[in-house]
Amino acid sequence: MQIHYCPPMPAHQTLSPEPQFSKVSYAVKRATFGREGVRSMDGLAFEDYTRCHARVSKLNCGRGFPPAWVNSNRQCAEVIARQMLKRAGFREPPAGKSPTEQLQLAQSVLMKERKPRLEQLLKSLACEYTNLKRENPHAEKLKMLRREIQIVDSQLLILSRAPAVYAMLIYYYWRLAWNGLQTARVLHIQYEHCRILIMRVKRTAKELGFD
């Protein structure tokens, strides 16, 4: 008489099967069953746990509850549109334009006027850094120049995708309650630049009367 092994179903239909006990090695591993019994044993066993690396990420609970406007898509769009207009140099929003039209207007101005200035500034800082490092590799000013180059490079990097960066910033920092370092990593920008963006968004939301 042949014995057919019927493994239990996974906990969720879209997830991989749960680890199962194997009679071969008496360890929790991911087993593949066939008519002849256990066909293959790959996965994690108890002895593998000592070599695993565990990383614990806690939510930043010191900020308290997020403001109400971050849970409203309409208010978030207004904050992002106003912030983009401020970056483009508009003191007051153009009348009769929706947030989408305001974003398009601000983006066109930024790409036409701000991008060449940032590229020129980055080139100037890079030349100054290179010349100073060649003359004095241990100069104290090198550290300051490196930080300025990183910030300008981050600004130039996100210039073409600034609305998406602001939307992701609001989602990860406020809705998911991530800290600034985690948010900066997922946005692929420097931590100092992320803190600047957070403060600017807070100020813009306050100017719009969103608490």
Image: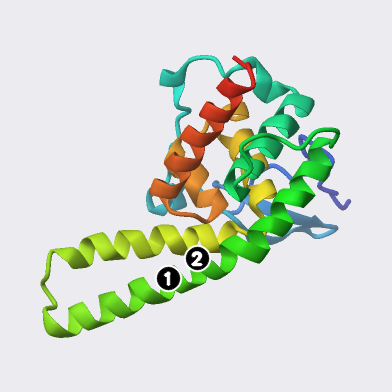
Q: Quadrant of residue 175?
A: top right
Contact, mark 2 vs mark 1 (Cβ under 8 Å):
yes
The amino acid on which the numbered mark 2 sits, given as a three-letter code, is Leu
Residue 30 image offset from top left, x and y in percent:
66, 52
| Residue 192 seen in render | yes
Q: How is the image coloured?
A: rainbow
x%, y% of residue 113?
61, 63
Residue 173 horizontal/vertical position (percent): 55, 33
- Residue at the image position 76 percent from the left and 34 percent from the top: 11
Q: Is residue 23 visible?
A: no
Residue 122's disc is 1
Q: Quadrant of the C terminus?
A: top right
Which residue type does callout 1 highlight? Answer: Leu
Residue at (13, 83) in percent of width and height:
135
Which disc, if any, is residue 29? none
Q: Secondary structure at mark 1?
A: helix
- In the displayed structure image, the side of residue 43 where residue 94 appears, left or right: right
The residue at 64%/57% (across/down) is 110
- Side of 146 relative to 210 (left or right): left
Residue 118, label in figure? 2
